[in-house]
Structure formats: structure tokens, C-alpha cells
Image: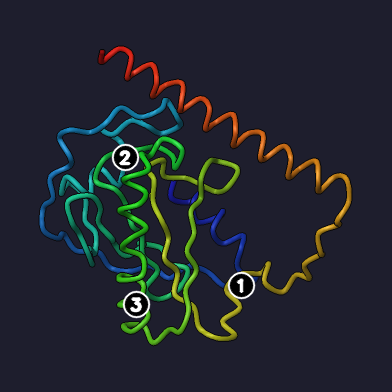
Amino acid sequence: MESRRLSILCSHLRPGSGPAPTRQILVSRSICDANQRPSDSDEGSDQNDCVFCKIIRGESPAFKIYEDDVCLCILDTHPLSRGHSLIIPRSHFPSLKATPPDVVAAMCSKVPFISSAIMKATGSDSFNLLVNNGTAAGQVIFHTHIHIIPRKALDCLWASESLRRRPLNIDQEASRLADHVREQLSLSVNSKDIKNEGSSLTGN
């Protein structure tokens, strides 16, 4: 699994560059949330084999730089840059879609605080915020996590940054795409409203 993860991440880098390993130590034991919510039947949803769940339970080593009741932040063991870190929820959710909005909000609310500390500690002036959601997007560990990747000017970390971006064609295809996305959003909102209404009726 680790080799696949590295090959996916390294495919974004310049040829010849590679992730630098970092030494690990066993840190303070954390208790995995006993009241974990049920998650979707996505890939890798087995909590017993999840490397992040093992870290949260104190069964695997990690460099922990922040933790609270909802999430923790650790240094990535195969960083793309010095200070590359991961924010992970204590409860196991295999994808961003399966992660409750309040958990996502709690994780994202820590980004300015944690990223500022990482940038100061590494002498960086910028950072990428990244979520690999799904196999095609490069997700290898199926426990929701957010990457904070410190950046410096001219580090040329992503090969894609040298690619010339094409402007959006303002045509019927773009209009149809926007309409289709709005339609899906509307269906999603209506579905949630129906579910909430059903719950309310049941409660009565």
C-alpha cells in the first residue's frame, strides 16, 4: 500500500525528485472515539487495518503536532516537502462524502492555526491544502484526511504548475455543465429536505 501511495504522489513531482523519509517515534497514546458513527461501505473502511485508526489508538508511531477532541494533525511519514502534515478525524470515515459536515468543519477550522505554525517552523511562505478523495484522485488510505503541504517560491513541487492552463470556452458545453451541476445540487438539497421532514414526522 505504501509503495502505491508513493508512486501516485511522486507522479506529480519533477523526474528525479522523491519523498524524503522521516524517523518516527511512539508518541502519547490517544483513544479512538468509542462512539464512531457508521460509515459508507467505501474501500478500506475496515478500522482494524486502518493505519490512521492505529495511530489514534496509540498502536502505531507518529509525530503528533496537534490534537483535540475531534481531530489530530501528524507529520506525513513520506513528505512532499518539509513540514508536510495531515489533519485526520478521530472517528473513521473512509471518504470526504462519508464524513459528517460538522467533522469536516472542525477539521477545516484548524487549518489557519496549524498551517501558520507549520509555515513559521519551516520558513515557508505558502502552502497547498489538498484532499485526495477516491481512488482515481490518488487516495490510498481510506480514512478522511487533509494534506497541508508547505511551499516556497520556485520549489517547482508540482509538475503540473509548469503546464499552460487553457481558458474556459464560454460556449454551450460550459453552460450545460453549469446547469447540470446546479441540477445535482438541487437534487441533493431536496433529498436532504425530504429526509429531515421524514425524521420530523417520525418524531411526532
Residue shown at 66%/40% (left/top)? 182
- Rendering coords of residue 160 (x, y %): 68, 67
Viewer-nearest of discs 2 and 3: 3
Check disc 2: other Cα within 10 Å, few if <14, some if 14-19, many if 20+: some
What's the amino acid at mark 3?
Ser
Mark nearer the N terminus (1 vs 3): 1
Mark closer to the observer (1, 3) = 3
Between residue 127 and residue 100, name the one nearer to us. 100
SS at badge 2 = loop
Foreground tag (1 vs 2): 2
Q: Which mark is residue 16?
A: 1
Quarter location, residue 9: bottom right
Q: Position of residue 196 (x, y in %)?
A: 38, 24
- Left or right relative to 66: residue 114: right
Q: Could you give the CA–CA distance between mark 2 and mark 3, rounded to whole angstroms?
A: 29 Å
Q: Quadrant of the N terminus?
A: top left
Task: From the top left corner, tell me how far across and down residue 146 is, in percent.
Answer: 41, 56
Is disc 1 placed on a helix, strand or loop? loop
